[in-house]
Image: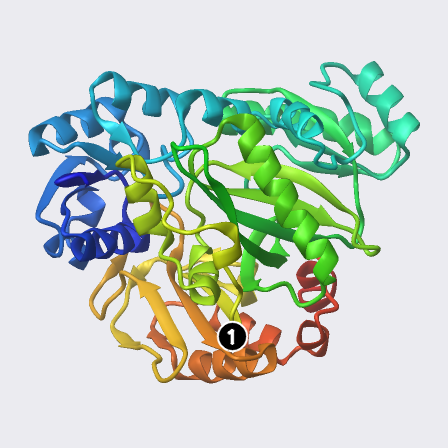
Amino acid sequence: MFSKILIANRGEIALRIIRACRELGVQTAVVYSTADQDAAYLKFADQAICIGDAPPADSYLNIPRIISAAEIADVQAIHPGYGFLAENDHFAEICRSCNIEFIGPSVEAMAAVGDKVQCKKLARKAKVPTVPGSDGAVDDEKEALKIAREIGYPVIIKAAAGGGGRGMRVAHNDVSLRASLKQAQAEAENAFKDATVYIEKYVEFGRHVEVQVLADNHGNAVHLWERDCSMQRRHQKLVEESPSPVLKQEVREELCASAVRLVKTAGYTNAGTVEFLVDKQQNFYILEVNARVQVEHPVTEMVTGIDIIKAQIRIAAGEPLPFKQKDITQTGHAIECRINAEDPARNFAPSPGTITELRVPGGPGVRLDSHAYAGYRIPPNYDSMIGKLIVHRPTRAEAIATMKRALQEFHIAPIKTTIPLHLQIMDNQYFQSGDVDTGFVERVMLAK
């Protein structure tokens, strides 16, 4: 086991990793920007090192400064968390060239699954269903129109290097395809410095279901079952739950088995998530692989009892997985709501500022992963998530009731948050029955 780890991230995930390390008896060093110099979690780490000013390019995305911090702190490994450099294969390569273990997959595996075009080829090799579409990158309008007419509208254009809804456009005819192709390429270039896009059949009214996987360096790979992340706004997840409320058991088992086949084919190690789109008939198709820990990992931890962050660290340290697939079961139902500093009444405008009042929920079955405190100033430079509210109860109906109660207890002022929207979701009859899809929130709940 490592004696000391550097955490190359901020906010709630930095605190989450610090806590896991403390329980493992591993010392921690955490980096921070000037915008986070008053973050309370810095006091929980054994060492805190300022690496630059607030802009991410000057701090959390600055590879030389992070490596320098790791060398100053004399760590054996770096945990990248999620976001920032977590899926940057160049960063992983630099870490290992400096004899610092990167807590994540190999550079080769990360590169293979990180490019969506290459990932699709891997999926076919592993006999994992893929959405009909282009075999590779689409470069020009003529080729795009040919593919769209062959597979039929609507189609979706996606950035090969992308995620989070950026570089993504839906087209319903030739006219919108021409405009959307240029828009998607420009957005992909701006967001990822890579204008490569590809085209797929757009599955309307689909659900987003993902599978958590763990793979060690000894040839063992398992899934930790699935999470349903269909409640989204602009391809950004709002609510996640496990197990999915609608999957038939035989579909669930094949979906999860497909995820394991894919990671084995890719030679993938450590934690990862294989994301799928599931249609009305419960046919499923791979979307992408996230080569890191996910924001929503706590719902899987609650239903399986497996600490994913500790598993990541142990795998990186060379330990074999201590369990087999048959040992991993889903118990009860877990739901997570992302609490963001945004105003749903003003088109989700960011609401940075100082939290002067904070009352957090508690009671049976309630977990809050958050770095916020009364007096904390939410900086405008980063993601607006304040924390994640998770509940775990024996049944889904009980989980919804507990989440509603916990949201009612949760008080944050004077900033605006997404708590009122989550209360609406918990009260919504379609959500309660499980009859939703990835476009439901915008189409039904936020429609003017």
Q: Is residue 326 left or right of residue 285?
A: left
Residue at image x 35%, y 84%?
A: 363
Foreground: 184 or 3?
Answer: 3
> Looking at the image, is 441 positioned above or below residue 270?
below
Is any part of residue 217 visible from this angle? yes
> Looking at the image, is 246 positioned above or below residue 151?
below
The colour scheme used to paint the residues is: rainbow
Read off the residue under disc 1: 420
How far across and how far down the image is residue 345, in percent? 55, 67
How far across and how far down the image is residue 102, in percent? 30, 30
Quarter of the picture containing the C terminus is: bottom right
* Neighbour tally class for label 1: few under 14, some 14-19, many 20 plus, Cα within 10 Å: some
Is any part of residue 380 visible from this angle? no
Residue at image x 72%, y 14%?
A: 139
Residue at image x 58%, y 55%?
A: 226
How far across and how far down the image is residue 407, in percent? 45, 78
> Looking at the image, is 189 positioned above or below residue 213?
above
How far across and how far down the image is residue 409, in percent? 39, 83
Identify the secondary structure beneath mark 1. helix
Residue at image x 30%, y 60%?
A: 353
Q: Is residue 421 left or right of residue 200?
A: left
> Image quadrant of residue 152?
top right
Looking at the rendered structure, the kind of residue marked 1 is Pro
Foreground: 279 or 225?
Answer: 225
